[in-house]
Image: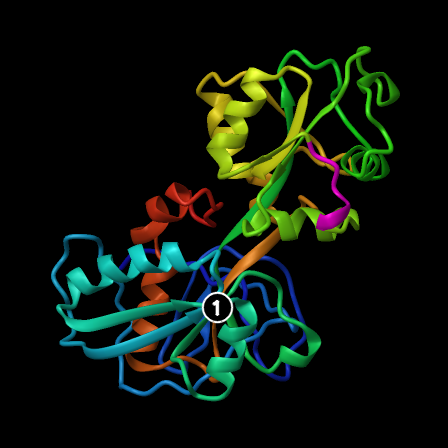
Amino acid sequence: MHSVRSPLLKVPGQAPTGIGGTGVITGDGLPRGRTTLLLSTLLLSIWLGCAGADAVASPGAKSTAPWSGRLLITGSSTIGPLMLEVGKRFQALHPGVRIEVQTGGSNRGIKDVTQGKADIGMVSRALTKEESGLFGFAIGRDGVCLVVHKSNPVYSLTSQQVADIYTGKITNWNKAGGRDAPIAVMNARQEYSSVRLFTRFFGIEYADIRAQMVLGDNLERVNAIEENPNGITYLSIGTAQRQAETGAPIKLLPVEGVAATQRNIRSGNFPISRPLLLVTKRPPTGMSKEFINFSLSSSVTDLITQHDFVPYLD
């Protein structure tokens, strides 16, 4: 059995404890392992049937249980593409299973499981106090960092400086400790999830951003910084760190003194980050439990990384 992480699990009647390593969902639907992070702010929904097993198979391994039927997973558009790939891999091990993934936002995931319309919800944020009765399992974390050209002499910015740069109050790098050069503000299109994480943290309204360029995905933003030494943008830490390590002339800026690294994302120390959760209304059982265990296992770590998220397992 592969090791399985369940660092985010709400257990009714218990207070939050520390962050944990590995664990599996056992027969009672609760995780067992070296340590577990119990968060009272976790959401999820729907009662799931089917008696189940705890084993998690590797890609290419034969199924140990004759699972069959349909699992409906709804919610976050951030997690959706990843769950499609995880679902394909799970179906390859269990040919009788059909995984259906529908997006529509984290709130839909919570609503659907609460109302019994979906087996599992996808939520790309921490659960609120109102949602603390739900059960949440973190498959990884997402984080956003600020990026400038490697040649830029600026090595850090305060949160106020970032807000002022993006709203047009600071327009020259010499007002932020850099050279005398106009700042080329690069924004992302509004539909990208990184936008919401960025604007909420810095208290900026998207409509108030004064950008010279509005760009697409992470790699498009990296390429724009490569071509403009005076540019600034934000993107997924997973992509930024990987691009920097492979030679892209970019520099990841710290936020509130915390370095933008996958290690700090994984530990929860980096301030612009969020958990990526699978949620249920009750402790998962049967095929739902099997799928969640699989999603938490080392069998899908490569898929999590490929989607620019930070896995809990290396």
Could you tell me residue 150's position as x and y percent? 62, 15
Could you tell me residue 166's position as x and y percent? 76, 36
The reply to whether the magenta stretch includes residue 222 is no
Q: Where does the C terminus fall, quadrant-wise?
A: top left
Identify the element where label 1 is drawn: loop
Could you tell me residue 14's position as x and y percent? 64, 79
In this rendering, the answer to whether 232 lies above or below 28 is above
Q: Where does the N terminus fall, quadrant-wise?
A: bottom left
In this rendering, the answer to whether 296 lies above or below 9 is above
Query: Would you say 290 lies left or right of 141 here?
Result: left
Query: What colouring style does the render use?
Result: rainbow
Task: Specify whether residue 212 is in view.
Answer: yes
Which amino acid lies under the numbered mark 1 shown in the image of this protein? Answer: Gly
The reply to whether the magenta stretch includes residue 209 is yes
Front residue of 214 and 150: 214
Give the magenta part as a residue range. Answer: 206-211
For the residue carrying disc 1, how many other residues have a C-alpha within 10 Å: few (<14), some (14-19), or many (20+)?
Answer: some
Task: Specify whether residue 268 is in view.
Answer: no
Could you tell me residue 101's position as x and y percent? 34, 67
Residue drawn where x is 80% and y is 11% of the image: 179
Q: Residue 3: which quarter of the image?
A: bottom left
Looking at the rendered structure, the number of numbered marks drawn on it comes to 1
Q: Residue 164: which quarter of the image?
A: top right
In this rendering, the answer to whether 239 lies above or below 103 is above
Residue drawn where x is 75% and y is 37% of the image: 210
Q: Which residue is mark 1?
A: 104
Residue drawn where x is 37% and y is 75% of the image: 26
Front residue of 232 and 2: 232
Query: Would you say 32 lies left or right of 158 here?
Result: left
